[in-house]
């Protein structure tokens, strides 16, 4: 059975490219352009995994993590942060807020894929 990934990314060119690559690896992919839409879609679709940018409009990735942690429907869905923020403080903050993984942009798809496989074990 194909696992479902909710990809929350405000740059449509990146989200479309990632969607294609993930589908080639047998994942079903749902796209959201900001954290608010992502939270609503997560509640509706209950994906196996969420990949989220940190800095995006409306609701950012840290606020998204807080929402997931405080919502019993979403609290067990792992979230991988995908961001250009490489500072250790940013990584630590995301992990403290409940991120299951952290991948920095620019990235190799094989590294993201390895993180996905590790999180979905």
Image: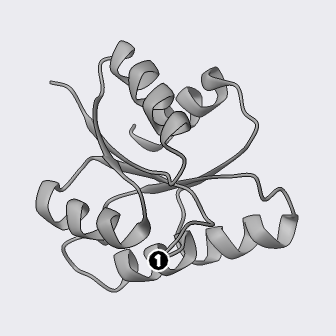
Name the colour scheme.
Answer: one colour
Would you place residue 70 above or below residue 20 in this image?
below
Image position of 14 (left or right of 89): left
- Along the viewing direction, whichever of 101 and 87 lies nearer the viewer: 87
Tell me which corner region of the image, top left, top right, bottom left or bottom right, holds residue 109.
Answer: top right
Q: Residue most toward the bottom?
A: 70
Q: How many marks?
A: 1
* Image spot of residue 1 (x, y percent): 15, 24
Tell me which corner region of the image, top left, top right, bottom left or bottom right, holds residue 2.
Answer: top left
Residue highlighted by disc 1: 59
Image position of 32 (left or right of 17): left
Please name the residue shown 36% across and 75% down the image.
Answer: 68
Q: Residue most toward the top?
A: 24
Would you place residue 52 above or below residue 55 in this image?
above
- Along the viewing direction, whichever of 72 and 85 lies nearer the viewer: 85
Q: Is mark 1 on a helix, strand or loop?
A: loop
Would you place residue 11 above or below residue 35 in this image?
above
Image position of 62 (left or right of 67): right
Image position of 73 (left or right of 52): left
Please name the residue shown 40% across and 21% down the image.
Answer: 20
Which corner quadrant holds the C terminus?
top left
Please name the residue shown 49% across and 51% down the image.
Answer: 9
Would you place residue 54 above or below residue 69 in this image?
above
- Along the viewing direction, whichever of 116 and 43 lies nearer the viewer: 43
Please name the residue shown 44% across and 74% down the image.
Answer: 64
* Image spot of residue 62 (x, y percent): 56, 76
């Amino acid at each position: 059975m194909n696992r479902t990934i909710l990809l929350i990314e405000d740059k449509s060119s990146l989200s479309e490219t990632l969607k294609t690559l993930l589908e080639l690896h047998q994942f079903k992919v749902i796209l959201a352009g900001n954290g608010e839409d992502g939270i609503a879609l997560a509640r509706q679709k209950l994906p196996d995994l969420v990949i989220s940018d940190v800095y995006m409009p409306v609701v950012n990735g840290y606020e998204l993590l807080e929402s997931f942690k405080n919502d019993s429907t979403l609290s067990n869905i792992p979230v991988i942060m995908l961001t250009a923020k490489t500072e250790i403080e940013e990584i630590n903050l995301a992990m403290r807020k409940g991120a299951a993984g952290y991948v920095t942009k620019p990235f190799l798809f094989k590294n993201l894929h390895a993180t996905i496989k590790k999180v979905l074990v």
